[in-house]
Image: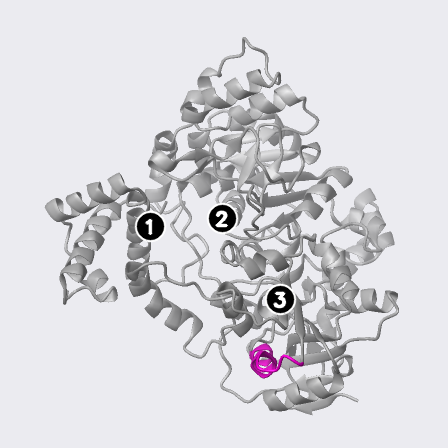
Amino acid sequence: MTIHLTDLDEAVALLLRRIPGTLRIAAPLAIGKPHRLLNALYRRVEKDPSRPMQIYTALSLDPPAAGSDLERRFLAPFAQRHFGDDFPVLLYAQAMKRDALPAHIQVEEFYMQSGALLKSSQAQRAYTSLNYTQAAAGVAQRGANAILQKVAREPDGTRLSLSCNNDTTQDTIDAIRALGLPRPLMVAEIDPQLPWIGGTAAVEESFFDIVITPPGPYPKLFALPRQPVGDVDYAIGLYASTLVRDGGTLQIGIGALADALSHALALRHTDNEKYREVLHALDPELAHHPAVIASGGMDPFAIGLYGCSEMLNEGFKRLVEAGVIRRKVVDDEALMTRIAQGTANIGDQARLERDGEYLHGAFYLGSPAFYDWLRHLPDDQRRSIGMRRISEINQLYGGHESLERLQRSGSRFFNTCMMATALGDAVSDGLEDGRIVSGVGGQYNFVAMAHALEDARSVLMFRSQRGEGGKAESSVRWNYGHTTIPRHLRDIYVNEYGIADLLGQTDEDCVIAMAGITGVQFQAGLLEKAKHSKKLRTDFSAEPEWARNTPQRLRDALAPFRSDGTLPDYPLGSDFTEVEQRLVKALGWLKTETDTLPGKLRTLCSALITGGHADTEALQRMALDRPASAGEWLYSRLVLHALSKTLSRPAD
């Protein structure tokens, strides 16, 4: 019988009575965590060494923290508005950042908030390296005895929805059962802010042993602030968009590169003439690139795409609204076979339109506008979106392989990496000293799936350069001491300088292709290392067209389209006010320019000598309009100087 409670502390007391000894708590990643319940449990256990606790989870999201006084002046008011004063910051995550978890509490994560835990010894030591599809089995092996999850309640109904996280819960229960272990105590915390998603994400109340409905007010869901998209990101997104074939399947990750790709795909469909104009400015010969001809296209989407991605985000919202995501699938192998063979009848088409879904995901995460979109979807659109298990989304081998092969025709898997080697390895999740930046997540699964499907391609996107000025390094490396994707799974790489198709190529061909998308200042060194390593013929010279791989040429090519609004700073909308958008550019420029001591001195001198145009609104937003000290006066000069430098330029 399901027990209904409203008091969190009462729920914690019941949980502790039900589970003697060590607490082995599993919680979903991202916003599926019941923050308030987890905090109540942590407060109770933290002071009681007799109750050891282990938490198995991933992506424990935390609002951003300022790294300097200027950042604090910008970030504090924004965070207050965006996250709310009552946002329940995860206590265990805060302690882990400080290496302050007590000895009887351990937190294991298989995916970390990007870069947030590089300095935490506790987090790095307790990191578990797993593909997303292996997470459920990993939790089962540890004998999880409770699963705590945030859920939505059905409007005017009795069912509950796993909503944002249908990813691992049911897989974990099945894995625990397969090991012959007791079913974990299932605890749900209802959050009225969580959008209702039906279909396979819906369960009866009896699925949970304890259902908690805490009293309001309810804090906001954790929301990712939408970031600006710069020239580099747009170029990558535009190149990548030409690799998508109409009638295919789309998976995308998260971040500015995914936003740029989504905008480019929407532009391709809604304003194809302008889309081709931008591409021609970027690369007049792009339409003749072998990978574009063989694997993609530039025409609008007559059939549309089916979205199948571990995470649903802002980009998919845009693509649904633009009419790009609309190819429906059904979980009926015979019907999907007839569709693939072109023998589907009128009844098949009617059923596909009535029962089909055009977007599948395992979890979702986005901005407040994205959550609001999900809450207010028309019924026909809501029925077209299905939240599925991670074992269904991230692989072909979850039990329905033949059906999923039919559904996932023409798959294109777009993911981001930090670096790539000239021989095709990808570095996406960690550093060569062993520290983890984020995690493998589903990237390996998707790359491997691209090789397992007949007409699929894996596309790894990355920025060609890391750092600026004297600290600049090429992201195309010869070797690196950490690998996420091995070179035997190499496929397509895309950065702002073009497309490198490595599938089935020799090592020498790969070196040449990757050098062709390397920044001009790094090409000679890369080629020399390749020759020294016997991977490139000694008489090879850089191709003349590679000389165009410069940031300035890229800016010049895209400038008209940045100024006419075709490529806006915030293609998917912004969570910043207009003055904040100006400040985001200015503060970003200032951070880059002062990254070195010479840069700091040069920028400071320029700010003192030239100052900048008056922007009272921006200074007021930074609480610098009435400087009360020499330090605040200096800050005001630096901010005005940065604003003047970025006033008419697009976001970087």
Q: CA distance from mark 3 to mark 1?
A: 34 Å
Q: How many marks?
A: 3
Indicate whether residue 318 is drawn in magenta. no
Q: Nearer the viewer, residue 78 or 13?
A: 13
Q: How is the image coloured?
A: one colour
Looking at the rendered structure, the secondary structure element under dot 3 is strand
Q: Which residue is mark 3?
A: 107
Establish if 563 lies above or below 352: above
Q: Which residue is mark 2?
A: 263
Q: What range of the chain is rendered magenta?
A: 36-50
Q: Is residue 363 left or right of residue 234?
A: right
Q: Which residue is mark 1?
A: 588
Task: Please identify, in this view, whether the residue under mark 3 or under mark 1 is nearer the observer.
Answer: 3
Q: CA distance from mark 2 to mark 1?
A: 23 Å
Q: CA distance from mark 2 to mark 3?
A: 38 Å
Q: Is residue 520 left or right of residue 160?
A: left
Amino acid under disc 3: Val
Q: Residue at x 50, y 69 (%)?
A: 94
Counting residues from the N terminus, which is met first, the one under dot 2 or under dot 1? 2
Looking at the rendered structure, the secondary structure element under dot 2 is helix
Counting residues from the N terminus, which is met first, the one under dot 2 or under dot 3? 3
Image coordinates for residue 56, horizontal then vertical, percent: 67, 66
Q: Residue at x 77, y 79 (%)?
A: 207
Q: Mark 3 and mark 2 in contact (Cβ < 8 Å)?
A: no
